[in-house]
Amino acid sequence: MVVSPKRRVTKAVIPAAGKGTRLLPLTKAAPKEMLPLGRKPVLHHIVDELLDAGIDQILFVVSEDKACIFKYFDDGSSRFSSVIQPVQRGLADAVLCAEEFAAGDPIAVALGDSVITSGEDAHITKRLLKAYETLDAACMIAVEEVPEADAPRYGIVKPKIEPSDVFEIDDLIEKPPIDQLPSNLAIAGRYILDASIFDIIRHLKPGALGELQLTDAIRLLLKSDRRVWCSKLRKTERRRDIGTFASYFEAVIAECCADKEFGEQMKKLSADS
Ligand code: G1P
């Protein structure tokens, strides 16, 4: 099948401007996205995932005090660039900082504090990009099943029909109250967005937590009759948010136990202790 160049995504944006206040004092020493996760910083895992999916230009959206992120990745090529988000007004605001970089092209968005491990040949980001090429979608979202009690912490989607591997949605809501859950499928930190999102964000009003929410912008896309599809994380895939000590420690243990050289030793150590 011949893919229109307009649907081939080669640019990705990594929002990484958050303050990391839940990981203090560690985040006074290094941004949370640069904390070690096994042999590489968190962000390096995400960058590798994107490069492996065929992305060849990556923009980091950072705050002023996070210049070390760009320095770490700068290899003298034009693959990596960064832009400063002057005030952290929410995820949609971070995405808006990428408008010039997108220059009218669709972009992948990968949250800088969400690492997804995968046992699949085609990782979730690869599957999102592939599906975007063939579907009439203005947006693709990775989703994961979460326990109902945890759902109010996430953006939750409402499938149009019984969800399969790839499915269309007709609504989504950021941090819904527990008695208004449209499903148990939570947005999992990976998106593909076409450039029409920028205009929508420019007119967006603050939503949950008083922030400009990307979920609300995608909802407006749906309201303007654009189509939004999701792809589900599979059983071998696991998203780990490194925003709190509990989830960061869990991610560190999992990564160390998967280490080619020391994994068995680490597994034994954590079983014994
Ligand atoms: C963000 C998104 C939310 C998503 C979550 C995990 O929330 O707004 O829709 O479910 O990431 O990917 P945050 O964790 O920044 O509150």
Image (spheres, rainbow, N blue to C red):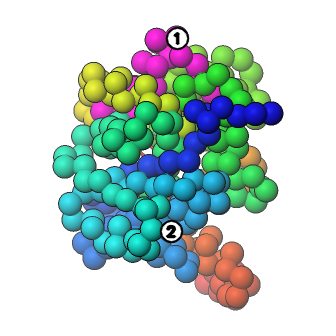
**For residue 5, side relative to residue 119 (left or right):** left
135 drawn magenta? no
Query: Circle 1: is it few (<14), some (14-19), or many (20+) Cα within 10 Å?
Result: few
The image quadrant that residue 190 belongs to is top right
Mark 1 → mark 2, Cα distance in angstroms: 37 Å
Give the residue displayed 43% in from the left and 33% down from the top. 104
Q: Which of 31 and 178 is in front in this view?
A: 31
Give the residues in magenta: 212-232
Instruction: Give neighbour class at mark 2: few <14, some 14-19, many 20+ (Cα, 10 Å).
Output: many
Q: Nearer the viewer, residue 112 or 129?
A: 129
Mark 1 / mark 2, whichever is N-terminal:
2
Mark 2: amino acid: His
User: Can you see residue 42?
Assistant: no
Instruction: Read off the residue under disc 2.
Output: 44
Quarter of the picture containing the C terminus is: bottom right
Q: In this view, does 265 lie above or below 197?
A: below
